[in-house]
Structure formats: structure tokens, C-alpha cells
Image (cartoon, rainbow, N blue to C red):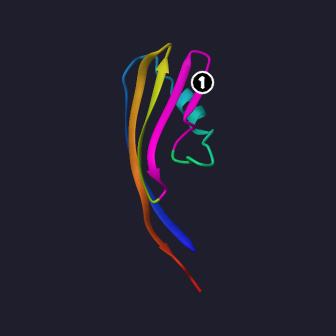
Amino acid sequence: MILFWSMNYYGQVIDNNFKNSFLKEALMHPSFDLPYRGREIYVKEDYTYKMDVSGDFSCFKGSEKIYFKNILTYALSFHGGKIIDKHFD
């Protein structure tokens, strides 16, 4: 079986304390159950990454936010899902 899926996302930097390196690090730790972006919560020093998603792999939507000392620095929305699955004999 071959599964084709797609995801679209759009984010904005909101505050000067945003660190791209922290976002990249958070995205390197996805969970097996929610592989869309990062884990539901990832914390390092004064930074916190939060991801919220609904649906399943066939159709999902969600958001992620990064906080620096409880101040929102980055927000992103995403959605996606299965395009086609094809069985080959």
C-alpha cells in the first residue's frame, strides 16, 4: 500500500524573543501518535512549544505556539490529510 498525504501550514513571528533554533529543535521530537509537527509540549529553559491537533491522519487540523517566559512569540496553523491510498497487487 502506498499512502499519499499533504499538509499546509502558515506561521508568524509575533515577538522579537522568537528563536528559530528552538522551533527546529522542538520539531525534531515528534510523537509517534501525532507526527504532524512537534510533541504536544516541549520545554527548554525559558521557551515552551505547544501543539494542539484534532482529527486523525486522514483529515487533521491544528496549531502550534511558542512562548518565551509565557509571552507568545510565534503562532502557526496547519491542516492536511490523506490524498489517496493505493493498493498494489
Q: Residue at x 41, y 20 (%)?
A: 72
Q: Quadrant of the C terminus?
A: bottom right
Q: Amino acid at mark 1?
A: Val
- State the residue in front, 24 or 70: 70
Q: Classify 13 as above or below 69.
A: below
Q: Residue furthest bottom?
A: 89
Q: Secondary structure at mark 1?
A: strand
Residue density around tag 1, few if under 14, some if 14–19, many if 20 or more, within 10 Å: few
SS majority, magenta: strand
Badge count: 1
Residue 42 is a magenta residue: yes
Q: Classify 4 as above or below 79.
A: below
- Residue 53 lies in what quarter of the image? top left
Residue 3 is a magenta residue: no
Q: Residue furthest top?
A: 69
Residue 37, how many percent across, how many down? 52, 42
Residue 82, how many percent across, how many down? 44, 62
Q: Quadrant of the N terminus?
A: bottom right
Q: Residue at x 41, y 53 (%)?
A: 80
Q: Residue at x 48, y 66 (%)?
A: 4
Res. 70 visible in picture = yes
- Circle 1 residue: 43
Q: Classify 20 as above or below 38.
A: above
Q: Which residues are magenta?
A: 37-57
Q: Residue at x 59, y 29 (%)?
A: 42
Residue 9, how many percent across, how many down? 39, 44
Q: Classify 14 as above or below 69.
A: below
- State the residue in front, 13 or 69: 69
- Residue 11 lies in what quarter of the image? top left
